[in-house]
Amino acid sequence: MIKIDFYGFYYNPLDGKYYSKGKYYIQKEKNNPNNLRKTKNKINEVHKSDNRLYKMIINNNHNHPIKVSIIMPTYNKYDQTSLSLYGLSKQTFPYSDYEVILVDDASSDKTPNIIREIDVPFKFKYIQMKQNKGRSSVRNIGINHAEGDVLIFLDGEMLTSPHFIENHYKHHIQESNLVVTGAMHYEGVYTFIMPDYNEDQSAQLKDLVKKDPEYMRLYEKYEHTKHNSNNPYPLVKKEDIDTERFRSLSFPNRYFLNSGLKHFGNRLNEFTLPYIAFLSGNVSVKKEQLNKSGYFDETFVGYGAEDWELGYRLYKNGAQFVLDPSTVAYHQEHPISKQKLKEQWGNHYRFIKKHPNIDVLILSLEWKELSFMHMHQTLVEYNALEECFPNDYNELKKAFRVMLFRIIAYLNDEQPVTNLYNFPEGSEERIKIHQQFETLRPLGFDYLASSFEQLYQL
């Protein structure tokens, strides 16, 4: 059992309770957002905890009940994370009611300096991993140390608006079993110039700086001196966050909305794949929901799908998904890892192996650049085919599921995606599949027929 000393009381992250001399302790003092500043010298004492996996340092320690815990993983993004923490210190939500848990996944840059440099008004827990463990593992550690009933998962490089926490929290006090996301209304922003940007990022930044003379001046200065350093060159200052001047360097990316989700409204009514809205860069959920559905699966390593897999379990446990543009955050752009695509297919493969169900397999159609609306309609028709003809079309249904699985399996193995379901001409199964396929469109299963055909011809 891990215990951290809180002024004579002990907080046990495993059950989320305070203990004093063996008794459960509940803080009864009324919430006063000014109390923390009045006792600043006391609350800024640093509390340390150490075990074999990580060490934790707590600033602004207090026993006031926490309502919201923000869990932020980070790895080698010192500059962006520092700005993100500053943005979180400007919230309209009472700072005695929320905490930020920054889980540093064994960064090799200046990230450990943050604990000495920051001056934030909220309770701040800095957890430094002794070895790199990956996104799922560090988020789970954050969950275990969270005191709030509502958890917001936020990437370490996200800039938030002043009403960010308030807008997430208001949903959870009005309804239960919700997943609230601002990630579908994605906004990117360039806060630093980095020499490792790819060509598209460099071109986009060059266009954005033209909107503001000061940013243009800084950009031109960098262009004249960039050969002297490989370090990030700052464009956005803290005062630019106060005035929201940084937004002139931002851009929208509505990939999910433009690919079909906007047709279903903010509640994703009747959408058959709502779990894809669980994107851990900016999403909130109650801790009790995770206790029922389980935490992040730590077999997922690297980039991708670990959030969708948890979202799928929440969906199966009845969670209602809400898209709220007022909870949007700004992702500070950074160079894209060359390993990202390989990690993505590897984790997607783990996802379909763990849940080889049609409402997970159908996401393989994204590789064919089919929209989420097309995937939804295909899934609706597949389910209708199952319901109307439970004992027929067995060969076609089997072939469709196998082809969807093999797309991801081949991508994971770096094999060509071809011959997904190849039988010799004249074989009995091939003939049955062709006969069954020919009846799909006459019966009104147009999307299913289109999706099947595109895979069968590979």
Image (tube, rainbow, N blue to C red):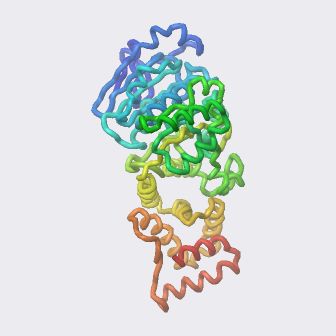
43 versus 434 height, above or below: above
Q: Residue at x 70, y 75 (%)?
A: 444
Figure quadrant of the N terminus: top left
The answer to which image quadrant residue 259 occupies is bottom right
Q: Is residue 233 left or right of residue 445?
A: left
418 versus 228 height, above or below: below
Q: Position of residue 100 (x, y in %)?
A: 49, 27
182 and 112: which is toward the camera: 112
Q: Position of residue 288 (x, y in %)?
A: 52, 37
318 and 215: which is toward the camera: 215
13 and 153: which is toward the camera: 153
132 and 214: which is toward the camera: 214
Q: Residue furthest bottom?
A: 426
Say whether residue 291 is visible: yes
Q: Residue at x 61, y 35 (%)?
A: 216
94 versus 367 height, above or below: above
